[in-house]
Amino acid sequence: MILLDAKDSLPLYRQLYDRLRARILTGQLPAHARLPSVREMVHDLGVSRNTVQGAYQELYAEGYIYSAPRSGYFVSSLDQDAAQRSLKPASHAPELQPEPAAGCRFDLHPARLDPGSFPGEIWRKCFIDSLRKHRDALVAYGDPQGELPLRRELQRYLERSRGVVCEVGQIVILAGLQQGLDLVAHLLRDSHRVVAVEDPGYFMPRAVFGNHGFQVLPVPVGPAGLDLEQLAAGAGSIAYVTPSHQLPLGCVMPVASRLKLIEWAESGGRFIIEDDYDSELRYHGKPIASLQGLRPDGNIIYSGTFSKVLSPALRISYLVLPRVLLAAYRRQFRDHFCTVSLLEQQTLARFMELGHWERHLRRMRTCYKRKHDRLLRAVEDHFGPRARVTGQGAGLHVVVQLVGAAPGEAELLRRAAREGLRLYPASDFYLAHKPQGTTLLLGFGAPSLEEIDAAVALLSRICA
Ligand SMILES: Cc1ncc(COP(=O)(O)O)c(C=O)c1O
């Protein structure tokens, strides 16, 4: 007996569909059982013909039932175990919910941006401009390598500000480092098996290359960046590096080491992936020029992103491929589409073309320099000799090593969580090696100046 509820907000045809579907999935209506004719169902339920036809058509369209000429509708044959499971509510649903942020008063995440920093109004105008200008282009797929106006703007910017020497044909627009590394893994996996990564270093490259079946080889990082002797002694033939602002330690690879690294790559058909993720954010002097610019024809894959200065949510990044990889890229990715929305690309191109990017960059440098300086002052005031700061002067975080009788890392994180302070230990970035003592990354991008003061004061108190 099927009961429908006329007061339910769900339309009657949908209720009938649901009831029949449940009976089919539970086996109450077995395979090849005949469904009552539309006329019988109309009569039994007292509903309109449209209601029954609507439900039957939907069940038919989704394959729950089939029709036989002049005989009516019959239940399709389904794998009964699988069918039953699809009726059960997913038992893991709560895990899909984001972690509640409640209880966190201060979050010193090393990669968060200032909450008010996105230039929403200007972006909106550029977006509307692009929509008007490129409306006709919206009915087709864009350039697989990324929209030309954006690549042109990028090429000029990279040459002027990062010393990158390339042509627009070498630039590929992507939706983040992860996709860039995926692409590199596809291009190099036939001839390379071992990727050397910085230890400590960013976790993402390890994961991406590991997922592609590469062996991931941790190489220690010293005050001058990646230890080149250890690199040369290992089997790695691809090196992933952050030479202009090492993540997480913040050191800069000096030019002598850069040249050695380039030689290492060139002498054995090896490759360097230069992740230049945040070098726009340098607070004293000029940004460090890129490694790629030292040898534009070298085996250097340059990676950049808009995530650190503009927005990580936009998901716009880019690779500059070395010429030696262009033919392979075109062959392997000829049939791929660009994953970044055409409108967002054109909006960004317009944003850059009108000079907003340069202005925004200057504003962001000023904003983060104030926060950076305030953090250093707060650490000095509250910790004095109890803390050693390194990696300052750039990016969105500094590294603070606790000196003397400080609590261990686990105990400190427990105390911090109790007080609503979210901390990020440097140990999370290590693979084979471990940091000395308790070392933290203190991010200053998101908190206000007052929050920076309060968070460091609290940290000092719970370290005592
Ligand atoms: C070392 C490094 N590279 C790149 C990125 C950003 O990459 P994406 O362009 O995927 O946002 C991050 C983000 O935190 C990073 O830490």
Image: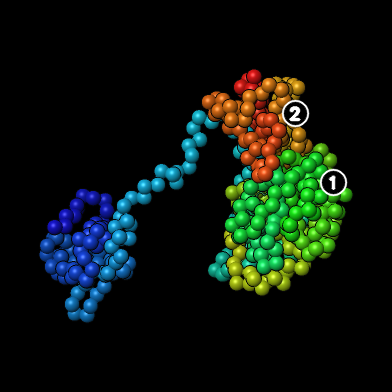
Instruction: Identify residue type, mark 1.
Output: Pro
Q: Quadrant of residue 334?
A: bottom right
Seen from the viewer's position, the closer of residues 378 and 155 is: 378
Residue 254's disc number: 1
Residue 159 can be seen in this image: no
Say whether mark 1 is within 8 Å of ligand 1: no
In the rendered structure, find residue 227 and report the number of the disc placed on it: none
Q: Nearer the viewer, residue 220 or 458?
A: 220
Q: Is residue 323 visible?
A: yes
Q: Nearer the N terminus, badge 2 or badge 1?
A: 1
Q: Is residue 34 above or below residue 234?
A: below
Q: Is residue 381 above or below residue 446?
A: above
Q: What percent of the width, then of the height, locates residue 42?
A: 15, 65
Q: Position of residue 198 (x, y in %)?
A: 72, 48
**Residue drawn at (74%, 45%) of the image:** 220
Q: Secondary structure at mark 1?
A: loop
| Quarter of the image that includes the N terminus | bottom left
- What x and y, as percent, mark residue 375? 71, 29
| 311 with respect to 395 (left or right) | left
Q: Is residue 132 left or right of residue 53?
A: right
Look at the numbered discs 2 and 1 and tell me whether their residues touch, using CB distance below 8 Å.
Answer: no
What residue does disc 2 label? 388
Name the residue type under label 2: Arg
> Label 1 crowding class (10 Å Cα cut-off): few <14, some 14-19, many 20+?
some
